[in-house]
Image (cartoon, grey):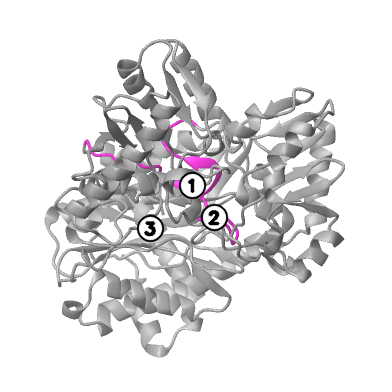
Amino acid sequence: MLSHDNLLPLRTKKETAMTIKERIEALRKILKQQGIKAFIVPSTDPHMSEYVASHWESRQWISGFSGSAGTVVVTEKEAGLWTDSRYFLQAEEQLQGTGIDLYKEKLSDTPSIIDFLKARLSKGDIVGIDGRVFSLATAKTMDEELGEKGIELRCITDPFDTIWVNRPPIPQDPVFILPLKYAGESCQEKVERIRQQMKKDDIDTTMITALDEIAWVLNLRGSDVHCNPVFVSYLLIDYDIKLYIDECKLTPEVRNYLEDCGVKIYPYNDFYSDLELNTYNNKVLADPVYLNYAIYKGFSPHSEMIERKTYAALMKARRNQTEIENLRKVMVKDGVAMVKFLKWLDIDADINHETEMSVDRQLHALRAAQADYIGESFDTIAGYGVHGAIVHYEATPETDAPLQPKGFLLLDSGAQYLDGTTDITRTIPLGPLSQEEKEDYTLILKGHIDLAMAVFPHRTRGSQLDILARLPIWKRKMNYLHGTGHGVGAFLNVHEGPHSIRMEENPVMMEAGMTVTNEPGVYKVGSHGIRTENIMLTVPAGQGMFGDYLQFETVTLCPIDKRPIIKEMLSGEEISWLNQYHKRVYEKLSPYLDAKEQEWLKTATSAL
């Protein structure tokens, strides 16, 4: 899953235009009072989360654009939204009549936000930001680049507290304990490992601001963010363990648990003032990608900040043995739900009476019947026909397309179970396909298999592997602009770093125990979209020339539809991989299916 959106109910263009324009004008009045020429609104929260609680959906509120990624810039006379290729079509639709221009990122004729501002502002002008929702890394870069023209970057108080009527509050839902049988390592053991690394590196304090890292360290989970089982908080580890959290979120059971773990509890809003009062000559480790700029600006001058990945980020990404065993178990459960769904869609459903939203509901019900199911890991992407080309499409009652016995249904979905998180995409033929659709499907499958078969030296980066998935379509002068793979949490965020597989450079190396998705795709506007996605586990491949080697084990268990495949386009090695994968899918899932489901699965996984 690349990302997901929480689409708002569609309004008429007139209502949208009036509402959004009035909000922008209200923001401009505040900016004018403070002498600010431009204001930047990102999509993040104070923890740099990819998906945020509704309290911090300021960018969506000011623009009406509901995609998960985007940045709005408001000047005295203009407003623009910058977003990536996943949301070009969605943004064009949702921005109509708002007066906000769309700027398509990564296209050669699209200026960066900084270049846009430099072209419109003069020396001495001020660009405002709410420093709590900008990362240190991003704000530092902006400050330097704007400073080249004498433009000041200034942190101001969040203006949306004033202009956003009925703004949702910060979530107050209770947190809960993740039992050791799922976590595999106690909170005390994790903290001890972190402290050992701190001692080795001469670090006095580790500051953890990423919500999934905090949840992982403490073996706690929450529900503050839609589909992501995290809770709003900060964590400091030195000679104490200090958790900053709204105390109403802590049940007596959780309080006792934290006390047993040696965790001291402080009010969430005291975090900033406590940092300012710190008079120790500390070396404090913090990740500049997840540390917000306001923390940095208010940081005690008596301490030194060490800016790099936290120890928790890398430890979390490398699954322990219990987490790996649970991962394999959860893939069986999710695979069973997927097979029941695919068999229903293929045999039992009347396609002419189904829609994008009805198949979403059917898959949800089948997953919800599995043990330890908690909820979806993201909002399902079910795009039929031309909707499959909208990379992050989500059906609404107004756009809910009826299925027809022809073409493709692209289905990207996942679930949260106590024992793991899943993420899978299948492109399903509903009837006759064009030659172009079959060729595109087979090319994407070739890239998927070629990456899945990779064997590579230890210390290889994901950016070095990315070409394996893209080469088949590059040869046809096609591409996709999203990443090929992201980490997946252990009953945590469906998007997990710090590693990735993508064209852009990422210095984090692939290591044994890391999960990563394998999801190449191709999207042809007005025609069709295709993506095939599995989760892979990085495992040792033994020793070779110049050291150790790694490889991928595909852990997702679900048939890949063979009907659109042009067999002649696959190599013998690729066909062998697919046949072996399907053999394993049948062996692992068939014991949990009834006779008719087994019969269907046997056909679906038969040798190509």
Query: CA gap, disc 3 to disc 1?
Result: 13 Å
Q: Is residue 344 above or below residue 275?
A: below
Query: Within 10 Å of the Cα at label 2, are there few (<14), some (14-19), or many (20+) other Cα atoms?
Result: many
Q: Quadrant of residue 478?
A: top left
Q: In the structure shown, which secondary structural element does the residue marked by tag 1 occupy?
A: loop
Mark 2 or 3: the one toward you: 3
Q: Which mark is residue 493?
A: 2
Q: Is residue 90 left or right of residue 448?
A: left
Q: Residue at x 57, y 30 (%)?
A: 136
Q: Is residue 505 above or below residue 527?
A: above
Find residue 341 and report its horizontal and vertical position in percent.
36, 76
Query: CA gap, disc 2 to disc 1?
Result: 9 Å
Query: Within 10 Å of the Cα at label 1, are there few (<14), some (14-19), or many (20+) other Cα atoms?
Result: some
Query: Label 1 near label 2: C-beta < 8 Å?
Result: yes
| Circle 1 residue | 50
Q: In the structure shown, which secondary structural element does the residue marked by tag 2 occupy?
A: loop
Q: Residue at x 50, y 20 (%)?
A: 143
Which badge, 2 or 3, is on the more N-terminal residue? 3
Find residue 524 and report its horizontal and vertical position in percent.
19, 48
| Circle 3 residue | 6
Q: Is residue 264 left or right of residue 394?
A: right
Q: Determine if the magenta segment contains residue 508.
A: no
Which badge, 2 or 1, is on the more N-terminal residue? 1
Q: In the structure shown, which secondary structural element does the residue marked by tag 3 occupy?
A: loop
Q: Nearer the viewer, residue 208 or 382?
A: 208
Query: Within 10 Å of the Cα at label 3, are there few (<14), some (14-19), or many (20+) other Cα atoms?
Result: few
Which badge, 3 or 1, is on the more N-terminal residue? 3
Amino acid type at mark 3:
Asn
Q: Is residue 178 left or right of residue 425?
A: right
Q: Is residue 601 left or right of residue 428?
A: right
